Image (tube, rainbow, N blue to C red):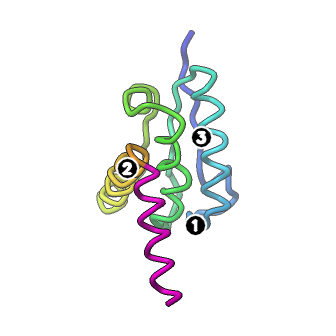
Amino acid sequence: MDKSITIKVADLIGSPLCISAEDGQKVFDKVEGFLKDGRNVIISFDRVTMLISLFLNVAIGQLYGSFSEEEIRTKLRVEGLSGDDMELLKRVVDNAKRYYANPQQYDAAWQDEGDEDEQ
């Protein structure tokens, strides 16, 4: 019964260019909804010609704020990425795990950084 749902990124955002936070949010919203329903999700990057970390941060990185690493590892699969894009995804995921492990500390550090710029 538990058939995986495939989200075709290029179809969902209507473009082969994965470069905007807004489009990343569309992917995140879909994936988050299915994961909350207990479904397994495959994110397909077939036909995607450009992918940047901003998009991945929003589309996939944010999931680490809503779900455990274990849930994501068992319920989510990504396919259709080149070797370089897989490396990019790995960096995004590592950063997201670090951030969501202690968001207050990171937010405070960003706040301090901003305060220094204004002086």
Q: How many labels does the image show?
A: 3
Q: Name the residue under label 1.
A: 17
Q: What's the residue type where badge 1 is placed?
A: Leu
Viewer-side label of 3, 2: 2
- Disc 1 versus disc 2: distance between alpha carbons? 20 Å
Q: Picture quarter containing residue 16? A: bottom right
Of the image marks 3 and 2, the number of the one nearer the N terminus: 3
Residue projecting furthest to the bottom? 119
Q: What element carries label 3?
A: strand
* Residue depicted at 49% across the width and 57% down the height: 57
Density class for disc 2 (Cα within 10 Å; few <14, some 14-19, many ≥20) is: many
Against 44, residue 76 (above or below) is above
Q: Quadrant of residue 85?
A: bottom left
Outermost residue toward the top in this view: 1
Q: Where is residue 83 in the image (x, y as percent from the top left)?
A: 29, 57
Q: Which of marks 1 and 2 is in front?
A: 2
Residue occupying image coordinates x 50% and y 79%: 115
What residue range appears in magenta?
103-119
**Secondary element type, mark 2:** helix
Give how far across and how far down residue 28 sits, in percent: 60, 46
| Tag 3 residue | 7
Per the model, the C-alpha gap separating discs 3 and 1 is 15 Å
Residue 39: within the magenta?
A: no
Label 1–label 2 contact, CB within 8 A? no
Circle on res. 26: none
Which image quadrant: the N terminus?
A: top right
Q: Measuring 40% from the left and 55% from the top, which residue is drawn there?
A: 105
Q: Residue furthest front?
A: 119
Q: Which of 42 and 47 is in front in this view?
A: 42
Mark positioned earlier in the residue sequence (1 or 2): 1
Q: Name the residue under label 2.
A: 93
